Amino acid sequence: MLVRNNPAMEILTAIAEKMTLVGMYPSPEEAIKALALSQIEREIKELRERIAAFERKYGMTFEEFTNYLRNRATMVEEMDWEEWDDARKKLEIREKALEAIRQYASTIS
């Protein structure tokens, strides 16, 4: 049984239990695991697409773009660099989270 110690957990537990009752998952734990993995995988896909869009736009990798901008960036290029860097950082965090959840999920399957 899932712990019900705060409002967020109560909502998540209720959703997971309903998904189990209608036969989507064998247990609330499996439902939560699937939801978490699906959400992170979706975010990773979106971030990879965003990074690829910058690579297409500038015809180079982030590292190449960083070197290209040294002492010559326009405001638009600087804003793109910030957004690109942010996407890279978020992607790294989500990939680590995905791996951690997969490792944990393998212990409860």
Image (tube, rainbow, N blue to C red):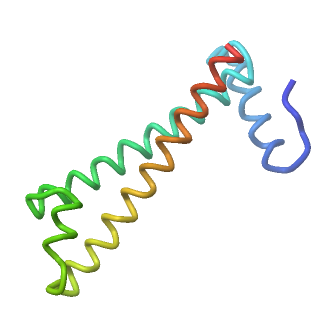
User: Seen in the image, is 68 located left or right of residue 93?
Assistant: left
- To which quarter of the image does residue 97 belong? top right
Q: Residue furthest right?
A: 5
40 is higher (above) or lower (below) than 57:
above
Q: Return the x and y of residue 13 as percentages of the image width and height.
A: 79, 34
Q: Nearer the viewer, residue 31 or 49?
A: 49
Q: Residue furthest left?
A: 59
Q: Return the x and y of residue 60 as percentages of the image width and height.
A: 12, 58
Q: Residue at x 42, y 50 (%)?
A: 91
Q: Residue at x 72, y 29 (%)?
A: 16
User: Seen in the image, is 71 located left or right of residue 50?
Assistant: left
Q: Nearer the viewer, residue 26 or 102?
A: 102
Q: Residue at x 87, y 49 (%)?
A: 6
36 is higher (above) or lower (below) than 58:
above
Q: Return the x and y of residue 47 as percentages of the image width and height.
A: 36, 51
From the image, which quarter does the N terminus lie in?
A: top right
31 is higher (above) or lower (below) than 85:
above
User: Seen in the image, is 1 located left or right of residue 35?
Assistant: right
Q: Return the x and y of residue 27 as percentages of the image width and height.
A: 73, 17
90 is higher (above) or lower (below) than 30:
below
From the image, which quarter does the C terminus lie in?
A: top right
- To which quarter of the image does residue 70 belong? bottom left
Query: How many numbered marks appear?
Result: 0
User: Seen in the image, is 51 located left or right of residue 73?
Assistant: right
